[in-house]
Image (cartoon, grey):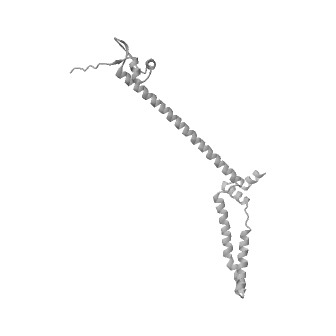
Amino acid sequence: MKAVETKIEYRTSAQVAKVFGVSAKRVQQLTADGVIETEETPKGRRYPWEKTVTQYIAFLSEKANGREKKQTDANLETEKLSAEVRIKEAKAEAAELELAELRGEMHRAQDVEAIVTDSALYLRSMLMALPGRMAVDLANAKTAPEASEVVKKEVYGILNAMAQYKYDPAEYKKRVRERRGWNEQQHEKENQ
C-alpha cells in the first residue's frame, strides 16, 4: 500500500491576516509570541495553512477560557462580597434589635405572650372565685334586684382590679434578664 502524500498549502502573512480578520502586523506579533509558526519554503518563510489555523483556534480558545475564568472569578468575588455585606447588615440589625430590647424599647413576642397569659390567668382565678365569694350574699338577697346588685358589685370589682394593670418596664426587663441567664447581682452591678 502506498503512503498518501498530502500537499501542504502555505500562506503569506497578508493572506493569514485577511482570513483571520487582523492586520499583517498582528500576524507577525502572533508569530513572534510563538502562537503560530512559519516554515521555510522555496518562496521564503510561509505559514502552513492547516497548522496555522489549528494553532490560532487553540490560541483563541485558551484566551476565551482565560477570560471566562477571570469573569467567573470576578462574579464569584462580587457574590462573596455581597453575601458578606448582607451578613454584616443582618448582624447589625440583630444588634440594634437586641439593644432596643435591653433598653426596654422593644419586647419579644414570647415575653409579651407570657405577661398576657399571666394576666389572663389572674382574671380566670378571680372569675373562678366569684361564685364562692358571692354565695352567702346571694343567699341573703331577698329580691332579684338585690341579687343583681351583689353580682354587679363583684363584677365591677374584678373589672376595676383589671383596669389597675399598668405597664411595668421592670417586669419586661426582669424577663429579659431571666431569658439571658443574668442574675440579680449582675443587674445591680450594671446599675451602679
- Of 183 and 6, nearer the camera is 6
| Residue 34: x %, y % from top left | 43, 19
Q: Quadrant of the N terminus?
A: top left
Total numbered labels = 0
Q: Would residue 144 be found to the left or right of residue 84 on screen?
A: right
Residue 63 visible within the image: yes
| Residue 86: x %, y % from top left | 59, 44
Residue 136 visible within the image: no
> Residue at image x 35%, y 21%?
49
Q: Would residue 24 be found to the left or right of residue 154 on screen?
A: left
Q: Residue furthest left?
A: 1
> Residue at image x 68%, y 67%?
119
Q: Residue furthest bottom?
A: 142
| Residue 139: x %, y % from top left | 70, 86
| Residue 122: x %, y % from top left | 68, 69
- Of 174 and 14, nearer the camera is 14
What is the quadrant of residue 108 in the picture?
bottom right
Q: Is residue 112 above or below residue 24?
A: below
Q: Is residue 96 above or below residue 82?
A: below
> Residue at image x 62%, y 45%?
89
> Residue at image x 57%, y 41%?
82
Q: Would residue 82 be found to the left or right of residue 69 on screen?
A: right
Q: Is residue 15 above or below residue 64?
A: above
What is the quadrant of residue 129 in the picture?
bottom right
